[in-house]
Image (tube, helix red, strand yellow):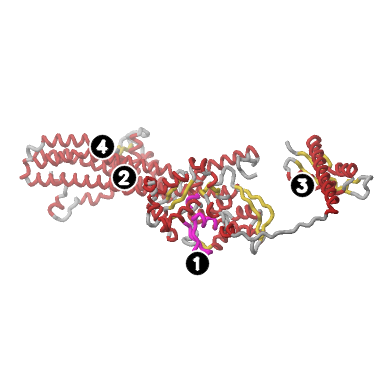
Amino acid sequence: MENANKKYSFLEAEEAEALFAEIDFMFKSGQHIQNYPHQVEMFNFVEKFEEDLRLYYRNLFKVNLAGKGSDYARYFYLEMDDESRGVVKSRAKKLTPEHTLLGILLLKIHRIDKYFINDIYVPDFIQLLKTNEEYKNFIYNLFARRREKEATEIDENTIDEWVRNSLKEFERLGWIHFDTRNKELFEIMPSIERLFTMYSYEIHNIDRLIDETNSIEEKTGGLYPVEEGEAE
Amino acid sequence: MEQLSLIPPALRTSRPLHFPKILRDRYNLLVPRQEDGLIVLAIFQKVRAGIIERAFPERIIVETIKQVLAELGQASGRGEETQKYDETVHRLLRHFIDKNIEEKTYQLSTYAENFCDMLEREVHTAINPSQIQKTFNDLVLLLALKLESLDDFRHWYHAQFFKHKADISAQLRALQAQIEDTVDQLNDLVKNDYDNFREMLIGCEALLDRIKEQADKLSSAFSSKDDIKQLLDDADLGVEFEFREMKRDVRMYFKDIEMRLINVSHTIDRIKPKINKLYNDFEKRDYDRKIETFLVYMLKNSTSKFSGTKKLKDRKVHNVEVFLAPHIREKELCSDRSRITGIDYLQLLEPPPIQLQTLEWDEADLSRQADERRAYMAREKRIEEWFNVISADVEKKKKVNFSDYYYKIMNKDNDYEEAVKEATLVLKEFTKNPDYEVTVFEEFNLDPKHPSIGIWKMQIKNIAS
C-alpha cells in the first residue's frame, strides 16, 4: 500500500480532493484539458503530476495520457494506443462523420483563412458556411441534396442543426468553449488541433490518396468495396 | 619610390590634391562608358576563344558594336547607325584599339587587354584558400630574409606584400559577391512564387554553407598573418620611421581582412535564420495547402443517406446519416461515460406503488377467438409458402408476372386478404432487394373466373449478375 501511494502520490496532494475526481471524469469522457481560464486549476494539477498521472492511467486503465502543444497552447487528453485498443475497446467512441467534417471546416476557416480573430458568433459561422463559395455547394449537397438556391426551410434547419450539434460535441470534448454569458459565442481551444493530428497521415498523403481514389474510380466506375465494420 | 606607397603623398602631408592634367583630360577616354567597355570585353573574349584573329578588320568592330547595343537595348534609329559606329570606333582608337595602317587591320591595345583581364579577375575570382595559404607561406619565408635592412624590407613591402595584397583582397571580394548573389536569389524567391521553391531554397542554403566553409578555410589560411606580425614585432628596424609606417600599413591591412572575414561569417549567420523561416513558411504553406485539399476531398467525396424527416422542438429537419469519403476512417476518442448512465437512484430506493389489475375472461367467446387465431396463423403460413414459390420462380425464370400468382392464390385458397397481403409482401421484399427490379405497368391483368377483380401488371425481374 505504501508503494502504491508513492507511485500515485498525486492522490495525496492537497488539491486532489477538490480536483482529481472531476479531472478523471473529464479525461475518461474524452475531454481535453488545457491552459485556459475555465480549466486552469485542473490544467495546473495535471501538469504538476503529469508523469504520475501517466503511470496511473497506463497501469490501471491501459490508456495513454497525452500532452501536446507548448506554453499556452498545451493540452492533455487520454488516448487509446495499440496496447489499450485490445483491452478497453468498449471505452472508445468514434467521432461521427458529421462532427469530423464540421471540425475540419472550422479549423480551416479559423486557422488558414483567418476568419474570426477571437470569439465566434454561431449565427455568423453558420452564415459563413452557407455562403462560402468554396464549400457551400458541397454542404448543401450533403445535408439537403440540393443547391443553395433551391434549399427549403427544412434544408436550412438541417444545416443549422448539424453545426449546432457538432459545436455542442466539440464543447463536450473541450475543443471549443462557449461564453458563459452568451451561449451563441464560442472560442476555439488549442486542443482542437488534435483533429488535424488524428488525420495527419491522411493530410500529409492527400495527393497520393486522391490519385489512388481516381485510379480506383477509373477501374470500378465509382464503386468501392465495403470495408469491414462499415455502415451497410 | 613615392608613387608605390600605399598612401598618396597628398594624404600623408595634407597638401591639396594634384592630378596630372593629362589624366583629368583623358579620364573619360581611359575609363570607358558602359557600351565601350563591353565592346572591348566582347572583342577580347572573341580573340581569346579563337573566333577572330588578333588582327581583325573594322567589320568585326562594327558587328560587335551592333551586338552590344542590341544587348543593352540601345539600337539606333535608321540612318543614325553609321555615324554612331564611326564615333564609337574613334573613341576606342584613343586607348583601347590600335590600327595597323598598312594592313588596314585593328587589334586590342595592351591597355585594353589589361583592362579586360582586370575586369574578369574582379568578377570571376575563384576562391582558392590553398593558393592563399601558399601566398602567405611565401610572404612569411621572404619576410624572414628581408628584415636585415630597411632596403630589403622595403623591397618585400613593395614587391611581395603589394603584389599579394591584391590577390588576398580579391578572394574576400569574391566571397562577399557570392553572398550578395545568394541574398539576391533569396529575395527573388520571396517575391516570386516558384514551383520549385523548396529545391531553390535548398540550393541557396547549400550555397551559403559552401561560402561559410570557404570563409573558414580562408580564415585558417590567413592564420600565417600572425607569423608576419610576430616577425615584424621582433625586427630590429623599429627605430626607422619608414619601417614603422610600413609595419603599421601591414598590420592595418591584416586587421581589415580579419574584420571582413568576421563580417562574412556574421552575414551568413544572419541569413541562416531567415532561410529557416522561409523553410518553415514553406512547410506551413504546403501543410495548409494539403489541409485545404483534404477538406475539399472530404466534402466532395463524403456521401449522405436521407431517411425522412424528424421533428425537433420547434422545427423539422432531415434525418441524415453522413458517410466519410473513401479511405477515410472515423477516428477514435477515449470515452468511458459509465458515471453518467442516468439512473435515478432515489427512484430505485422508493419505487412507485404497483397498480393491481383484475383480469376478466369471456369464457363463451374463447372458442371463437381460438378459431380466428388459428385461421390467421394458417393464412400467414400460406402467405410465406406462396412467397417462397414466387422467389424460387424468379430465381429460376429470372422474370415473373405477379398477377399470375395473385389469381392462382384466389383460385386455390379463395382468400382476398391472403392475396392482398401476398402482393404487399412481394412488393416490399423485392423492391428493397438491389438484386431485383419490380416494375408496375399501367395495364390491368384480368381473370374471367374473378370478374370483379383487376390487378395492375407487376413484373419482378432478377437483375443480379
Q: Mark 4 packing: few (<14 Cα in 10 Å), some, or many (20+)?
A: many
Amino acid under label 3? Lys
- Do callouts 4 and 3 mark residues in contact (Cβ within 8 Å)? no
Amino acid under label 4? Pro
Q: Which of the chains bears the disc numbered 2?
A: B
- Do callouts 1 and 2 mark residues in contact (Cβ within 8 Å)? no
- Do callouts 3 and 2 mark residues in contact (Cβ within 8 Å)? no
Labels 1, 2: front one: 1
Residue at the disc numbered 1: A181
Label 2: element kind: helix
Q: What is the x, y in percent for residue A138?
A: 60, 52
How far is disc 4 from disc 2 in space, using C-alphas? 16 Å
Q: Which of the chains bears the disc numbered 1?
A: A
Say if residue B348 shows up in the picture.
Answer: yes
Is the C terminus of chain B in the top left, top right, bottom left or bottom right quadrant?
A: top right
Label 1: element kind: loop
Question: Vertical placement of A174 versus B132: above or below?
Answer: below
Q: Mark 3 packing: few (<14 Cα in 10 Å), some, or many (20+)?
A: few
Residue at the disc numbered 4: B129
Residue at the disc numbered 2: B177
The part of the image, by quadrant, that contains residue A37 is bottom left
- Do callouts 1 and 4 mark residues in contact (Cβ within 8 Å)? no
